[in-house]
Image: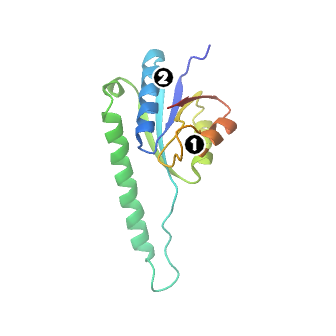
Amino acid sequence: MLIPTKILVPTDFSDYSDKALEQALDIAMQYSAKVFLLHVMREMILPASSDSGYSEELAQLIQDRRRTDILDRLHNQLHKFPQAKNIEVITAIRQGVPYETILDEAKENDVDLIVIASLGRSGIAKYLIGSVARNVLKGAKCSVLLTK
């Protein structure tokens, strides 16, 4: 029987992600596990090479503000769940291809359970598993719990 000690929860701030986080927090309370709450930023604002684009300083300022906004959203998402106060939760923001970054984060933190929503913001139909969840499920070396 799996007794998780480290649980990774990727979030895109959708209602589906809220349900996955709630499930992970319940499991974490039951087994005294640590929770890693992760948001993956897809796009990166790059400074333009011409005079008509963003300067490097402006691009960095936009990235910094975006990270601050995402951190606020992570904390706001956690505050929806009172049980989070009794659990060690580590929040993280990474940049990259979502499923690859989730798998890398799981490996880096030696996670033994990933709790992920089967659909997210980009869900096109409620009967299909989202592409991020599907690729995480296929590539994960640990157990994966899909929520809906």
**Residue lying farthest to the bottom in this orientation:** 51
Describe the colour scheme in one phrase.
Answer: rainbow
Q: Quadrant of residue 114?
A: top right
Looking at this view, is 16 or 108 the one in front? 16
Q: Quadrant of residue 140?
A: top right
Q: Position of residue 55 (x, y in %)?
A: 43, 77
Q: Position of residue 71 (x, y in %)?
A: 37, 47
Q: Look at discs 1 and 2 and give the one toward the viewer.
A: 1
The answer to whether residue 110 is left or right of residue 77 is right
Crowd tier of the residue under label 2, counting other residues whose Cα lies within 10 Å: few below 14, some 14–19, many 20 or above: many
Looking at the rendered structure, the kind of residue marked 2 is Ala
Q: Say the numbered circle drawn on residue 130.
A: 1
Q: Quadrant of residue 131?
A: top right
The answer to whether residue 136 is left or right of residue 18 is right
Secondary structure under tag 2 reads loop
Residue drawn at x 38%, y 43% is 74
Q: Position of residue 93 (x, y in %)?
A: 46, 48
Residue drawn at x 56%, y 37% is 127
Q: Position of residue 69 (x, y in %)?
A: 35, 53
Looking at this view, is 18 or 85 the one in front? 18
Crowd tier of the residue under label 1, counting other residues whose Cα lies within 10 Å: few below 14, some 14–19, many 20 or above: some
The CA span between labels 1 and 2 is 26 Å
The N terminus is located in which quarter? Answer: top right
Q: Say the numbered circle drawn on residue 33.
A: 2
Residue drawn at x 52%, y 56% is 42
Looking at the rendered structure, the kind of residue marked 1 is Gly
Secondary structure under tag 1 reads loop
The answer to whether residue 104 is left or right of residue 21 is right
Looking at this view, is 129 or 72 the one in front? 129
Q: Say the numbered circle drawn on residue 58.
A: none
